[in-house]
Image: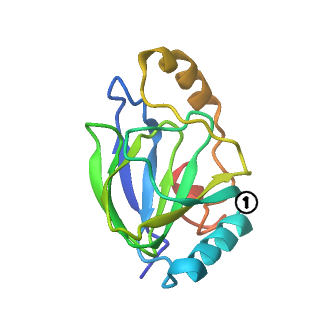
Amino acid sequence: MDTTQPHIYHFNDDGSIPNNKLPLLVYHGVSGLTGHEGATWFEKRFAANNWTNSWRNGVFPYHHYHSITHEVLGVYAGNALLHMGGENGEKLHVRAGDVVVIPAGVGHKKLEASADFAVVGAYPDGRDYDILRGEPGDRPRALENIAKVPVPGLDPIMGAKEGLSKIWV
C-alpha cells in the first residue's frame, strides 16, 4: 500500500465542534503488525517523528476534540466505525494497520467497534491534551487555543518528506 498518499477530509465548523482548516488525514494499511507488536511499532514510529506522550486504549463513544494539540491514532487491533468532524462530518471505517491524523479542534467519536479494537494515541512534541465536548462555554477559549497550535514539523508516519509535512503547509 502506498502510505505516502493519505485520504484527506475537510470539515467545517458545525457550531458545536469547531473543526479546523487543516484536513484530517487517514493512512490505510501502514503496518501489518497487530496486537502488542503493532502497538509497539506505532509507538516507536510516532516517537521517531517526535509524536510522543503516547497511550494505548480506544476512542471515546461521544463527540470530543482537543483544542491544545493535534493527535494521531494508530489502530493496532480490530476495526471500528468512527464519526469524524462532528454530527455533520463523515463516518470512516478504520482497521488494524491504519493511522488517523486529527488536527486540533476536529471532532471524533467511536460509533461501533470490534471487541478487540485498540489504538495508540500520541501528540506532536509530546504535547499535553484537553478533552472538550462542544459545550457552548468552551468555544471562545477553544477557538483561541486551536489558533495557537503549531503545525508539527514532522508527519507521524512519513516524517519530513510527505503527509502533513506537505499537506498542512
Residue 86's image quarter? top left
Disc 1 secondary structure class: loop
Is residue 7 toward the left or the right of residue 144 in the image? left
Residue 120's image quarter? bottom right
Is residue 30 toward the left or the right of residue 110 in the image? right
Residue located at (51% from left, 64% from top): 119
Residue located at (43% from left, 47% from top): 60
The count of marks equals 1
Q: Amino acid at mark 1?
A: Asn
Residue located at (44% from left, 38% from top): 64
Residue 128's image quarter? top right
Residue located at (57% from left, 66% from top): 162
Which residue lies most toward the front here?
115
Please tell me which residue lies in front, 164 or 131: 131
Please tell me which residue lies in front, 137 or 143: 137
Is residue 43 toward the left or the right of residue 94 in the image? right
Please tell me which residue lies in front, 64 or 165: 64
Image quadrant containing the N terminus:
bottom left
Name above or below for residue 83 compared with residue 28: above
Q: Position of residue 12 (x, y in %)?
A: 34, 34
How crowded pointer 1 is (Cα within 10 Å; few <14, some 14-19, many 20+) is rated as: many
Q: Position of residue 150 (x, y in %)?
A: 66, 40
Q: Position of residue 42 (x, y in %)?
A: 60, 71
The type of colouring in the image is rainbow
Q: Which residue is mark 1?
A: 50
Q: Position of residue 149 (x, y in %)?
A: 64, 36
Please tell me which residue lies in front, 92 or 167: 92
